[in-house]
Structures are given as C-alpha cells and as structure tokens.
Amino acid sequence: MSPRAKWIAVAMVAAVAFGAAGATAVAAWQSSDQRRSGPSAVDTAAGEWGSGPRIVFRNTAAGAAYGHVASVELEDPSGPRALADVQCDRVDAVDDFYACLRADRGIAPSYSATVYRTDGEVLAQWPLAGIPSRTRISDDGTLVATTAFVGGHSYAGGSFSTETVIRAVDGAVVGNLEEFDLIVDGAVIAPADRNYWGVTFAGDGTFYATVRTGDRTSLVKGDAQRRTLVEVAADVECPSLSPDGTRIAFKRATAGSGETVHWTPAVMTLASGEVELLPERRSVDDQIEWLDDDTILYGMPHADVAGDSDVWALRADGTAEPVMLVPHAWSPSVVTED
C-alpha cells in the first residue's frame, strides 16, 4: 500500500471512530436532556428550601429540577421537597450554608467545589483535581473536606487515586491529607501509593478518614493542627461519626474483589473497637449519614434507571430491615436546627 493510500485509510478509520464517538455523545446528551425536561416526577413545595430541621440531598427525580439541591422536612421525609437553584453531584449541609461538588461535563470536563449560603450567595469556590466523590462540613461550620478521583472513578478494585483536601469555608487550604504524617504502630510511614477519602469531622480540628496503602484499607484519626493521621482500625471505609461521638458507621468489603466487591454497612464502637455488620443485603457504595443516634442513611442507585437513586434508612443496632426514606434522592445530609 502506498503512503498516500495508508493515510487515506487512517483518515477513514479516524472519521468512523470520531463519528461513533460523536453519536455516542449525542445519545448521552439527549438522554440527559430528556431526564431534565418536563415537570418534576415528585411533589415540590414553594418557599424557602433551606430552613427548619431538614434532610438536604441531591434531587434525582426526573424533570426540570433533576440534579438540584433539595430538602424535605425532617418530620416528613417522603413529603414535598423544596428546591434550590443550584445543581450538584455531591452535597453536604449545615445550618447556614452547604458544600456543593459539581462536574461540568463538556468536551473538556471540569470539576469544582463551591460553598453556598442557603440564600444562594457564593462564599468560596475552587477547582477539584478530578471527578467529585465525597464532601463533609464540620458541625461548627468552620471546615470543609472534599475528595475527588484523580485517577479512576470507583473505590472498587485498586486502580484509583484520590485527592482529599481540608479547607476553611472561605476556601483557604488547611491541608492536603497526603502531606500529613501517617502514623502506624507509633511510627511515621510514607508509602508512595497512599490514598485518602471519606472525611468525617469530630470537632476542634479532629476528624476521621479512610486511608488505603497497597491492599490495606484503614480508619485513621486526624489532627488538622498537628497535621497527623493515626491508624485506628483496619477494614473501615468511608467513616461517619455518630451525633453522640461514640460510634463510626462505615462500609466494609464483605465479599467479592476488584470491580465485584460487595460493601456491607457496619457500625464500630470507638471505645471497644467492636464492629457489627448491619442487615443490608445490597452493596452500599456511599458515605453513610446519621439521621440521629439510632438510624443511619445512605443512597442506593436504581438498578433499572440510570442516574436515579433513593435514600434508605437503617437501624444502627441491626434490629430492623432497611426502609426507603426519601425517594429519588442522593447524598443525604441532616440539618437538625437553624
């Protein structure tokens, strides 16, 4: 084949490839656009969305408000939802403001974190290094943590890398967890492959998070002022501290491996280290939220509807089966008072 013929063949293959990619992108955009068009598939409420005891979440009901931050009354979680004008992929809220992680999906995707007041005023905004994954605000409203996938897009398997950063709510960097001292068995170690995610705050700059080094996943207790992380327990992933500060809810890999890993929700008592697996048969890939000292919440994607999910509730003592609490919702956050 002549050089000219080779270039023509390459060009034809490239044209077909780009055409297929373009068709796939158009189909995905049309599907997304259809999901966001038309009236909302759930009841919505007029008025202030960010007031009173409430559950804040990402709305996944089909309709014009798909992806928007929403809230329901704490006493009526299946009732009408109030909507904000902001779209987020992950959200966490406290009394007066909330953190929003967003992926802007275009030809060149970009990722960002924004702290909003409940009235929509932007307090701070900064870019994320990759796909949004987790965010938490400290109860005292001073710190916000974000986790993004720098490589990969799932915690299943080992082929991912993360960036987890703690900031003040004005956006000032407190620290990237990879720059903190990691202490295991009393000694500082610095493995090249360590990844952190799933921060949960305990107050006064203290927090818990997950670290993965090699094939080992552990719970660490962090100190933002001293910039230290001390290993607490093995096989604890995506921790969430209970309101009374005595227990950690988390997901534990209980079956499978790699991309087929199965995560079961569990609760660990910090004082004793005792762990109880909870009666949830489905795999839970979420950072758990506490509804109160007795009940945990988590999101479960729909198996048959891409992009949709529900928030489920489960007794933390394992005495009952899970129940759906908020339909068509994701990334729940409980705000108990103004």
Image: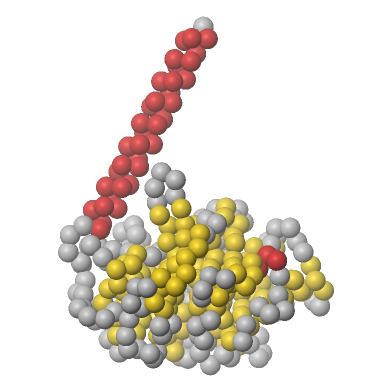
Q: In the rendered view, does 276 fall on the left or right side of 25? A: right
On screen, 119 above or below 10? below
**Residue nearest the observer in this picture, 327 or 39:** 39
**Can residue 60 be spotted in the picture?**
no
Query: Which residue occupies the extreme top position in the image?
Result: 2
On screen, 204 above or below 165? below
For the C terminus, the quadrant is bottom left
Q: In the rendered view, does 240 fall on the left or right side of 27? A: right
Q: In the rendered view, does 337 fall on the left or right side of 27? A: right
Q: In the rendered view, does 38 fall on the left or right side of 207? A: left
Residue in the picture at 33% in, 77% down:
119
**Can residue 149 be spotted in the picture?**
yes
Report x, y in % for residue 20: 36, 33
Report x, y in % for residue 214: 70, 60
**Residue nearest the observer in this picture, 119 or 60:** 119
On screen, 36 above or below 219? above
